Amino acid sequence: MGDVADKVAYFQAITGLDDPDLCAEILTAHNWDLELALSNFTSNPRAADDANASEATTSSTNPEQVETGLVVGAAGGPPGLAWKIVTLPFSIISGSLGLVSGAVGFGVWAVSGVLSYGLGMIGLNSGRNGESSSTRLLSVSAAVSEAMDFVACFERDFGCIRPNFVAEGFMDALQRSRNEYKLLFVYLHSPDHPDTPVFCERTLCNEDLVAFINENFVAWGGSIRASEGFKMSNSLKASRFPFCAVVMAATNQRIALLQQAEGPKSPEEMLTVLQRVIEESAPVLVTARVEAEERRNNICLREEQDAAYRAALEADQARERQRIEEQERLEREAAEAERKRKEEEEARERAAHEAAEREAALVKIRQEKLLSLGPEPEKGPDVTQVLVRFPTGERKERRFHCTTTLQSLYDYVDSLGCLAVDNYSLVSNFPRTVYGAEKLSLSLKDAGLHPQASLFIELSS
């Protein structure tokens, strides 16, 4: 531990102080002698309290009591069954070690135990009955490892008839007791105390007591040589060993100390104490269980209501989406129908306009052709009488000069507007003669149609 940072970290882990600068100041005052600083800190409660007071402000209680995580009873006596609620968040801000004893010999034992733990942390000592020291600073995984080591060592030393100590950190055990609506039975194990073996063998491993604890409590144990057990002995102000306590979770990460039993106790005495705690705490536990059940029921009811609301909301949203989609579909169909109607109307208008233009053009052509014929001549030797029969049976008759070309006959037929087609031919019956395009320049006389002719119209296929 020659490195300055390591000394600060180690001093911080042992004392529980959160401020590294404060730890550095204490070590500087002791010329960086780690063992001397720890010895003075643990053997001088006033100095330890002053150091903790510089880190956190504590609530006012009995002036003779210094709070370091739990409010306990007056020195030398149990707190009774009136709950003393924790006034600081249970981060276990370690303050005074509180290892106060009425006997000088017991005080020497307490200091020697602390120094033994400190030497063990730096690898210069080993635990009783082969307990190995840890060189790691406490972490989340280390708390579980310490609990597992304690359970294994306790079972090895005292047998398998024992309280079912949970192999997890103190805060996890406290949360477990809260979840199970039980009180937490805490046992702090001091391997070097002369009363420890007898208490463990005859009292703590008594079958009746073990059965009562396992049925009514969540049990947690820790060695004061381990980091978390050492901090718990500090927080619970354990002044005598063997040490047992009954605690429960309170609000705002705090705990309530219900009962503590210090010094050797018989199985009957421990049963009496624990039964009284159970009896007086039963209403609170029942109330907590009922309130938790009501909370769960309320949560389930709210979840069901929320689920029903979400389902109804989703159904409404689905119906609204369907309505919007249907409306959009109808609007699209209406828009498409309107577009088609406009297109058809425009097409009809174009067709009508084109038909009107064509009709106007035909009328104009017919008028031009009619004008090109000139006035109908009077009867005479040079005038040809022409009769034209239409496919409808209608007949038209007109006189022409015999020198008029066959083109004039076609112009005459066109000017009448009786045909809906343009492709046709003028044909005579006897003999059958077709007066087609190759004969349009012939005169009526040359074509053999003078002095009179009877023609019919033959539509081209």
Image: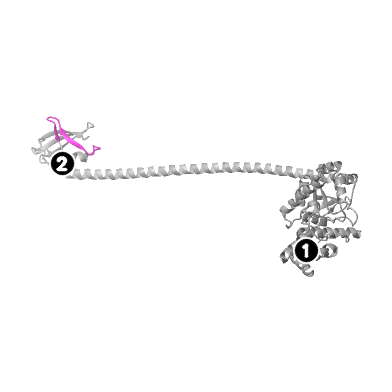
Separation of disc 2 and disc 1 at Cα?
130 Å
Which quadrant would the C terminus be assigned to in this image?
top left
Answer few, some or many: residues within 10 Å of disc 1's Cα (few below 14, many 20 plus, some between 14 and 19): some
- Mark 2: amino acid: Ser
Label 2 residue SS: helix
Q: Main secondary structure of the magenta part?
A: loop
Q: Where residue 404 sits in the image (x, y, percent)? A: 12, 41
288 or 231: nearer the viewer:
231
Compared across the picture, whether 354 is left or right of 133 comes to left
In the rendered view of the protein, which quadrant contains the N terminus? bottom right
Query: Would you say the residues marked 2 and 1 are in contact, meaning their CB atoms lie under 8 Å apart?
Result: no
- Quadrant in the picture for residue 377: top left
Q: Residue at x 53, y 44 (%)?
A: 324
Per the image, the residue denoted by label 1 is 55
| Amino acid type at image mark 1 | Glu
In magenta, the rendered stretch is 417-434
Nearest to the observer: residue 224 or residue 316: 224
Is residue 53 one of those drawn in magenta?
Answer: no
